[in-house]
Amino acid sequence: MEQSSYSNLATTHLLGSVPAVLNEEKKASYEVPGANMQIFPPSNGGGGYQTLGAPTEVFEQQPPNNWKGVFSISSYTQYFNVDTDVVINRLISSFYPIGGDFFSKIDANPDLYGLIWITTTLVFVLASFGNCATYLTQKHSDSSTSWSFDVSYVNVAACGVYGYAVVVPMAFYFLLRYLGSNASLIRFWCMWGYSLSIFIPTALILLIPVEILRWIIILIAGTASACFVALNLRSYIEGNDLPMMVVASFLLQMALAIFIKVWFFP
């Protein structure tokens, strides 16, 4: 009885109660009228006002900030997107100068991985094998000579190899751009980096303590590396009357080879 009496009480007057069905008149009163967006005043070309699409056109006309990408690490990730097979193929090409145009192989995807990996490996190889060669030479003349590691070899190797691999391609790039040639700095760094790979196994052979044999080995390696750079640079600037650029690249590569022999394998 008590439950039925409570259920029959009217609850529509209580706060927060919701009627079961709304009347159509009340529902219509809550409808929000549709808003029509109009451009005021209309753009007639001389009123000083612009339509909604005008700001987008202004932003598209602004030139991009090219220097922002230079200091962004993400802009260089594309130059390290190479796998092992690609790197090995480019290494083999650097050992065989007349095997084809190296720039045509790296045109779609020039990399800086080879430049960094090869130069860093060459720095430590020259420093370690250079000390070993000096010790073997001294040991051959004086059996009482004791082993001592010269740390200055690391500093000289780092300054010489890194400086050559970075500065020389950059100098050729700016010179060719000044002369009107369409040069690419990334491709130059890639080519010069792989051109140094032949000096890594050469440093191991130079441990032989025979002076005349060392000179023959370093001259062969230097000539192969110089021909690789000169022939590819000639094909890159083909059509331009710049034979001195090719000769200069050949002589600089030979100078690096002689520097390696004289300083690290005396």
Image (spheres, helix red, strand yellow):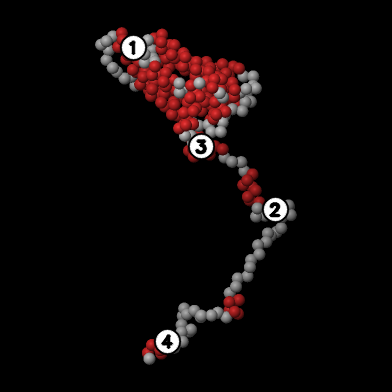
Residue corresponding to mark 1? 137
Where is residue 156? Give x, y as percent: 40, 20
Kindly report the distance in space between the C-alpha atoms of the residues bearing marks 2 and 4: 69 Å
Q: Residue at x 51, y 80 (%)?
A: 20
- Is residue 12 in view? yes
**Marks 1 and 3 in Cβ contact (< 8 Å):** no
**Marks 4 and 1 in Cβ contact (< 8 Å):** no
The numbered dot on residue 48 is: 2
Q: Point out the image quarter for the C terminus.
A: top left
| Mark nearer the N terminus (2 vs 4) | 4
The numbered dot on residue 163 is: none
Kindly report the distance in space between the C-alpha atoms of the residues bearing marks 2 and 3: 45 Å
Residue corresponding to mark 3? 78
| Mark nearer the N terminus (4 vs 1) | 4
Task: Report helix, strand or loop for mark 1.
Answer: helix
Amino acid type, callout 3:
Gln
Q: Residue at x 38, y 24 (%)?
A: 124
Kindly report the distance in space between the C-alpha atoms of the residues bearing marks 2 and 1: 85 Å
Name, please, the residue furthest toward the left: 144
Task: Report helix, strand or loop for mark 4.
Answer: helix
Amino acid type, callout 2:
Gly
- Is residue 185 in view? no
Kindly report the distance in space between the C-alpha atoms of the residues bearing marks 4 and 3: 75 Å
Residue 234 against residue 36 in the figure, above or below: above
- Quarter-wise, where is residue 2 in the image? bottom left
Residue corresponding to mark 4? 7
